[in-house]
Image (cartoon, rainbow, N blue to C red):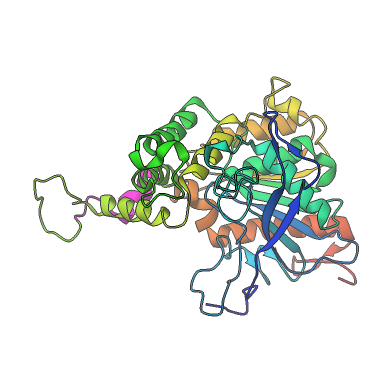
Amino acid sequence: MITTSSVGIVHTQYFTFAEKESFRLESGAVLSPVTLAYETYGTLNEDRSNAILICHALSGSAHAAGFHAPDDDKAGWWDDCIGPGKAFDTDRYFVICSNVLGSCYGTTGPTETNPVTGKPYGLQFPVVTIGDMVRAQIRLIDHLGIDQLFCVAGGSMGGMQVLEWAAHYPQRLKAAIPLATTGRHSPMLIALSEVGRQAIYADPNWQSGDYYDKPQKPDAGLAVARMVGHITYLSDESMNLKFGRRLQDREKFGFQFQTEFQVESYLKYNGNNFTRRFDANSYLYVTKAMDYFDLTEPTGTLAGSFVHSADIKYLVVSFTSDWLYPTYHSKELVTALTAVNADVTFLDIESTWGHDAFLLEVETMTELLSSFLDRLWVEANGGRRGANGKWSVAGK
């Protein structure tokens, strides 16, 4: 539903580059051309100093806020935090979100047409990294005429992109907000990713990635991969509160291998629903990019990667019930940033929602993000805190 706090009707835009000169990836492979799908909300100010880049997670898209049509009943994936008066206040900021390289929502990836063959890339698409995704975003930001972003923010894989921006392109942003994320995947996280990929490989309809012109898609494998992933986004407490051991549409056990528990039904529903909006090959590419991400390289330490990033203001957030990226991951980031004398605000938020808390703890996130961004805005533009405790900027 479109409300006064919504950015309203939005349209996905497309930016194409590397049409003449190929875009070289970290693997050494090249792409030409490259198209990024993106959306913007709010207005870029005259000196182009109010731009915020939002980075999405594994299955996200450029559609972060608003609606695509008047009768659209599903808002963008972070609509709760982007809009007039919200955490990322579009009355003040120009907010940008682009779909990452390798995904399946309009950006160049395995689902898009390979100009050499005229068919979808499939597994002929080269493996990409978080670094490749960010370098593609830089091309977009350059295209929009923005020299320095006011802030880059994102959770989970989006947080990895934020850290990549801060570590390797510190001159291009004033502030960084990595939420529920990590500087590198642990062996357990890589193992969980691999279980999902193996589920896709095992689906006979996957056909080694060459299934786009086939009547059957590897939906079963992708659904299982999503079910495994979705479990990691929740917490033991949230699952107990939501489902307990309650049965689905029955009063007692059937002593059969059928869906009996509510939590089983929930996972099957989410897995099957996921196959209607995401691509199996894209799942392989994006999870692999997350596994390759390691900010301790090439210096050997996290602090070494941030040695030139001390001038950036950081807000690092973790959640107590997040077992996918537990609090210690964020504490390692804070320790590294503190070692280079960076300005870091760190909060470990009490929540039962697990990894998804950065999307679901709306009131907490709104207050936290708004306060952090307000302080930075005042510092950047000059101003003071009034008797009511609110920041004000003269002439703004």
Reply above or below: 350 against 92.
Answer: above
Reply above or below: 46 against 228.
Answer: below
Reply above or below: 201 against 388.
Answer: above
Q: Nearer the viewer, residue 193 or 113?
A: 113
Query: Where is the C terminus found, in terms of image quarters?
Result: bottom right
Quick one: which residue is furthest to the top in this view?
300
Q: Position of residue 44 (x, y in %)?
A: 81, 65
Q: Residue at x 68, y 32 (%)?
A: 29
Look at the image and give the residue range highlighted in magenta. 235-247
Q: Nearer the viewer, residue 194 or 30?
A: 30
Side of 374 relative to 356 (left or right):
right
Side of 301 relative to 243 (left or right):
right
Residue 254 visible to an observer of this rendering: yes
How many numbered dots are placed on residues in this image? 0
Q: Residue at x 36, y 44 (%)?
A: 236
Q: Position of residue 141 (x, y in %)?
A: 79, 52
Residue 320 visible to an observer of this rendering: no
Side of 347 relative to 257 (left or right):
right
